Amino acid sequence: MLDVRVLRELRSAVGERGLITSPEELHTYECDGLTNFRVLPQAVVLPDSAQQVQAAVRICHRERIPFVARGAGTGLSGGALPVENGIVISLARMNRILEVDLVNARVVAEPGVINLDVTGRVMPQDYFYGPDPSSQSACTIGGNVAENSGGAHCLKYGFTTTHVLGLEVVLPDASLIHIGGKALDAPGYDLAGVFVGSEGTLGIATKVILRILKRPQCIQTLLAAFPTTNEAGAAVSGMIAAGMLPAAVEMMDKLAIQAAEAAVHANYPVCGGLLLLELDGPLAEVEALVEQTNEICRKNGAWEIRIAQSDAERALMWKGRKAAFASMGRLSPNYIVQDGVIPRTAMPEVLSEIERLSAEAGLRVANVFHAGDGNLHPLVLYDQRVPGQQNAAEALSYKILELCIEKGGSITGEHGVGEEKKMMMGKMFSEPDLEVMQRVRCAFDPLQLSNPTKVFPRPRLCGDKAGEYAPHPLETAGIAERF
Amino acid sequence: MLAEETKAITRVSREALCAIVGAAHVRPAEASDAVAGVRAQMVAEPGSEQELAAVLRYANEAGLCAVPRGGGTKLSWGNPPARLDLIVSTARLNRVVEHAWADLTVIVEAGCTIQSLQDTLVQRGQRLALDVLWPERATVGGVLSTNDSGALRLRFGGARDLIIGMTLALPDGTLATSGGKVVKNVAGYDLPKLATGALGTLGVITRAIFRLYPLPQNTRTLSVFTRSAAEMQRFVLEIQDSQLAHSALQVRFGTDTPPEADILFEGTQAGLAAQETHLKKLAESNRVAETGPAVWKARDRLWSSANTGVIAKISLLPADIAKTVEAVERITAGQKVHWSAVVQATGLGSLRLDGDAEALHTSLRELRANMERDGGSLVVLHQPPGMAQLEAWGNPGDALPLMSALKKQFDPKNILNRGRFVGGI
């Protein structure tokens, strides 16, 4: 329990309205989008400015209280899961767009700004913000920065890290620094490059400089129905071999299509493998590409190809895909979303192996992918009420990740390691690899206060020699390891 | 930064180095091995990543200062080394390890030249979408460490946006890999970005993994002539605000030469024709002419007979191009300083100044102050021999203590490129 003096100080740092301590209200913050991990925070503070963030962090630093920054709590890896004996710093009140600089194509936003609101602000001038995670109508820029969020269109437009040019950051010792800027290549280390995607372990962003993009002249969205995912995958390979770079290439298997249909009636064709493709650019260019895509899909066995004829049709095509995770509720009481990545060419063998593992475990797996970049989202369906099924589902989802590692891929393409996958890090990276990453953490956060138990399999005290691990105070304090 | 006493405190042990890399790959340094005028004692050419890491560990334990070297084309960028004992060359680490063309990725060793990498990629119709200086000699490691980029950056991003994995050798002999060989990957910290542009001060890059792009089916370069910087500025912003899908856009200026812009289109023939028509609507069509790929070498040409001039990398906001040109004109007026510049629509550019050494020094300082005030920067890449040394980087800002802490974590004895980076790092 935080003592009364600390609570009083936190209250004076963020104001009466900015401090939550009642157990009922704290429950809202006990998990993020990964709901099977829950920890009740000691308190939640809601600062309204960078100065208030600093004030709260200063108290944490002095008292050695670990803290976890939180945006909208939509993350899927437990990145915003509170830590034992720690507080949550919610950035929800810092939700102002501070500057729109259209001539330089920059927007300066506070971390609590919702992703889609950035595009909303610049849409009248035909600009948009590139990264489009499926949760973009709820998730925040600060959370996107922490996770280096992607989305369907990052195949062509890049990830959050491509679009964040600068940051104001409160470091875990409460100092305020500025990294990067509105202009490119500020002298010094690319700290923005390492901060974006660090999952809240290096400090708290209080201001973010974003790059925005001009909307392309023409956007065409297509659906192509294939007998199985193998033919659909072959079509994607055909496009890559032809030198095409679509704005998005999404794939869904039979089970995922069924779920999406049941949930949002996207009017998808019933098939074994569905491609959702988007091509954009100058009109003449897109026309030529649509023709080429048509040909490649037909050649690879597509028996139906639909082109969206209106914005409404386009929106409906996307609605089915964006609702894919949530729609699993129609098929199964519970499900686990995974986020593995494989070299795209390994897809057929990985999918048949997933099928085998699924049959072996007696659990259904629906597959939704960002097929253009090999990012798989297998959805493992289970029923919590059946004894042992949750454990079996978790074990299956980790086996799929091991398969991704085996094929030279990654355990996470956009959801982050967080709490969920930290024990997989040791399978993807060697001990020295992880030790060098920890050096970065030690430079930013020598006391390990900022989201301290996430990303890495074991906490490490800064100043340790490589390979020597002492139990961290938090470890001895009883943070259960899951494996 | 004052140059430290460069005489080595410790003598490099040739025997120790021979034991690691073999006698054929160790030699005493010659005058031509000097870095920014600072002589070295020995040159070692490891034949593997493990050997390179072992050389670093030896240097670290023996307290020797090392400078990593690829093709040596940009070796003098940054401040002169405060001390230099050993040059660690990546010349023998020059293989393209794996071109996974169907996955649009390549694994390449740090000492491979950009040209030789591109020659491999072109066989499958692909490219590393980075137009660097002196590709025939510049290596992957050197390009990454100096963060060199050209006009294609507008469409494809810089080295930081193309690198997806890296192996780094640290002074304590650790070989650490981060990232991977898939484009989309958020597992662990993004060390490839941290090491890109770090001028070899955190570790020595031994291999890199890049995402690739297909070669364009067709390209067309058009150039637009304008009467003034203000007109050019309006035009650049208009193109950037249009729905043209150009891959590159640069502006060329100079003393007494009217500004000219070059724009690169890539794509299908139908797409190129449509975009040319669109462009001609934006500019008066009699000012638009089809030129050719040679204009994209304008940045390289600033470097010809560079000995006598100053060359700087400038960074500004795209809307500040005309303002910056006016500042250059104002500052150099009456100083008998001749200038020329190539600025990309990204706001990154190269500036060359020729003239009297003292005038150059004064002009640069004033211009840097000007640009930093507007949120930009000016990094001096080349200084002529007669000019009083100017610190290369300028103001590193309030993140310098954190940068120093990072340096200390990676290179606690400060043996790599000592004193060459920002703020004395």
Image (spheres, rainbow, N blue to C red):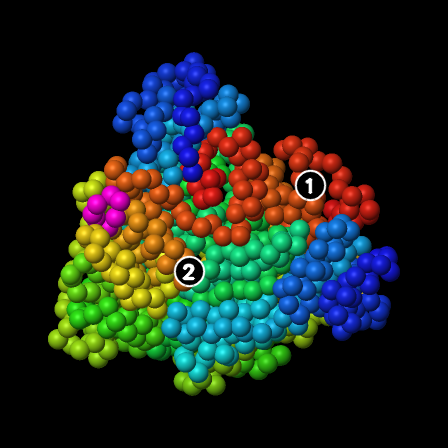
Mark 1 lies on residue:
A460
Disc 1 residue crowd, few under 14, some 14–19, many 20+, Cα 10 Å: many
The 10 Å Cα crowd at callout 2, few under 14, some 14 to 19, many 20 or more, is few
Up-down relation of residue A473 to residue B334 (above or below): above
Query: Dot 2 lies on which element?
Result: helix
The disc placed on residue B373 is 2
Q: Nearer the viewer, residue B175 or A300?
A: B175
Residue A369 drawn at (x, y percent): 52, 63
Q: Could you tell me if residue A350 is visible in this image?
A: no
> Residue B27 sits in which quadrant?
top left
Badge 1 sits on which subunit?
A: A
Query: Where residue B353 appears, x then y in whole percent?
Result: 24, 50
Q: CA distance from mark 2 to mark 1?
A: 41 Å
In the displayed structure, does residue A276 sit left or right of residue A433? left
- A256 relative to A456, above or below: below
Q: Residue furthest top?
A: B15
Tell if the residue under mark 2 belongs to the same chain as the one under mark 1: no
> Which range is magenta?
B353-359
